[in-house]
Image (cartoon, rainbow, N blue to C red):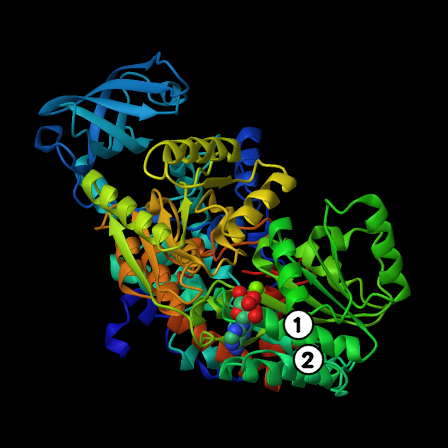
Amino acid sequence: MSAADVPLRFASVQPLDRRQLTAGSRTAPRASRLAAPLPRTSRRTSAALETLGIASLGDLLEHLPFRHEDRREARPIAALAPGDEATVIADIRRIARRRTRGRVSVVEATVTDDGGTMKAVWFNQPWVVDRLPPGTRAVLHGRADTRRRNSFVVSTYEAAPGVTAADVRAEGLTPVYPATEGVTSDRIRELVKRARPLEGETVEPLPSLLRASERLPERAAALDALHFPDDEDETELARRRLAFDELLVLGLEYVGRRRAREEALSAIELDPTGELAGPWLASLPFRLTGDQDRAIAEIDADLASGRPMQRLLMGEVGSGKTVVALHAMLRALENGRQAALMAPTETLAEQHMATLDQLLGGHVPIALLTGSTPTARRRDVLARLESGELGLVVGTHALIEDTVEFRALALAVVDEQHRFGVRQRTALEEKAPPGRSPHVLHLTATPIPRTYRLMRYGDLDCSILRDLPAGRQAIGTHVVDGARARRRVYERACEEIAAGRQVFVVCPLVEESEVLQARAATAEAERLADDEFRAHRVELIHGQMSARRKAEAMRAFASGEADVLVATSVIEVGIDVPNATVMLVESAERYGVSQLHQLRGRVGRGRHPGLCILFGDPDQPRLRALAEESDGFTLAEVDLAIRGAGEVLGTRQHGERELRVARLPDDADLLERTHRIAEEILSRDAHLEAPEHALLGAARASRFAERSGRIAA
Ligand code: ADP
Ligand code: MG
């Protein structure tokens, strides 16, 4: 950006004087007025503000608007067309709460200006009646109803005695804030306006040299511009400045953790002894892929270093992660230590157990520990883990209960770690001998684009399995809509069954309730068994069934006795039936791209090509992407672009805070850049002790206060 592109407000703060340049950033803030509590607010308002995280004037200034309303074009009522978003200045004539059935509360007002009359409507804000009594002049922003004429749904409002359209136009872009019951966006705006003169006291966390070389406006100016911008460009520039700070602090945390790990020689060294892992690899009936070889070498280097490994092993279902993980587990074993694999669900744990058992060929003892492990068996497993007699264990959360003790846990493998909470992940690590950190290998079958990985797992090293093992089959994917096309799909599925193959049917995801989802799957299984698949054996599996019945259904399908398996998304992960060639997904649009990609990966695993049918709208970009793209990593990028980062991994976790200002993938460049800058800063000043880094250190400390294990952003 050239100096000429810098908006005026920022240009005025760009030049730095020499003193600032040499002194680094401003020295520690004096007892700032920003730390003062909010003046003159009622108890109710203060309480509401507190739920928004606003306790001080400083908090208030950091409470950023999520959009701006354009007041530059305040319009007369007579000029409104249905669907218009607009600002209107009008007088309240009548206003009343209307009774409605259900829980929605509605306030309706008759409002007029010089040339017209309309009905203004508020949903779920009963208190508006008291705020805008008849006779009040009000600024109303909202949207003219598309169906009912002369009706206007208000999004924000303000009582504004004597105000004119000209006054309002002068307001320009008006910030809209996250609000909550007890304090409206408008009220927050008033408070921010009053606190505005204090913006200059905002702490500037960036060293002046960095700020100058990155050509960033001062934080205070950026905050002001984000609250009250002159135009849209200014908002974006300001947002990028704040995003820079946010991502830099994240980078400092991740890079800092990684460095701390590299300095700590607290892990047990696991050297290749040649006793177990090597001979086992040599005994496998297949050759490892290049990626598997590479991952194994990377992990071996970690394990032998004495520094605790924290590595993410990423690869699609079937890419051979388990083989790599087991090799590492055998390293622990041949060094006389123990290894544990923890999976998020019993089904997955059982599946892992089966794979490991098969891969080990019964030569090495391994046990399963889940919530359903019978008491006597459980007692036996616990005793053998404690004595060290048992070297390998697979399980669920049951592994981290207090009663579980290891004699010498040296490696923890955590499958799909994003499905565990921070506490649960660290609880397993704490099973290592006192003063020792275990090596940790995180497995994920969700391909995570680089950008997102940096944000979420920036503190982990990463190995990727991209090549699929030889012999994997192509999977034709089609999006299908309409009754006739659907009939043809069933005919095609029946042909596959006639040729000796098997079919999965996945029922729609019902977010609200597993019970409803189970019911839907049951109904669909019955329907199919009576109709399209009446000549075949149909089995059902869903989350509400007992473990026994699930296992029985699985067994029937895996053995080929059943031709069709109707399932809820429980089969998303962890089912390996190479003879299955057809995957039918109902209401595919309810699933995310990566889920669908994983479901599709259930077929085409044997000698025959697979077919995946997504029932849904062929114009939906996500479904189209699946039909066109087979590579999981490419799809993950597409997914990220379509949905944005917040949603990509689905489950948002307890204890995780989202990015506040930065947006991915838009700010991917910033993320990379700040990460590099964090590396530079920490390589010169590992503990952020230099005066010019003190405020960055403070920002990092306050952002990541709840230290304990990994905290994803
Ligand atoms: P993931 O855990 O990534 O889903 P697995 O490690 O469970 O994959 O491997 C899936 C299947 O492929 C297993 O049956 C495994 O034995 C087999 N397999 C793994 N690596 C290879 C390979 N290099 N060549 C052929 N088959 C392999
Ligand atoms: Mg596996």
Q: Which of these two is toward me, 276 or 206?
A: 276
Under mark 1, the amino acid is Leu
Q: Is residue 266 visible?
A: no
Question: Label 2 amino acid?
Answer: Trp
What is the quadrant of residue 499 in the picture? bottom left
Task: Give the residue pinned by disc 2.
Answer: 280
In-front residue for pair 93/78: 78
x then y, percent, for residue 183:
46, 33
Mark nearest the camera among 2 and 1 is 2
Assign the C terminus to one quadrant of the image: bottom right
Residue at image location 28% in from the left, 28% down from the top: 161
Picture disc at residue 326: 1
Q: Taking 559 as reference, is 217 above or below it?
A: below
In this rendering, the answer to whether 661 lies above or below 152 is: below
Left or right: 619, with 241 as reference point: left
Instruction: Verify CB contact (< 8 Å) between mark 2 and mark 1.
Output: yes
The answer as to whether callout 1 falls within 8 Å of ligand 1 is: yes
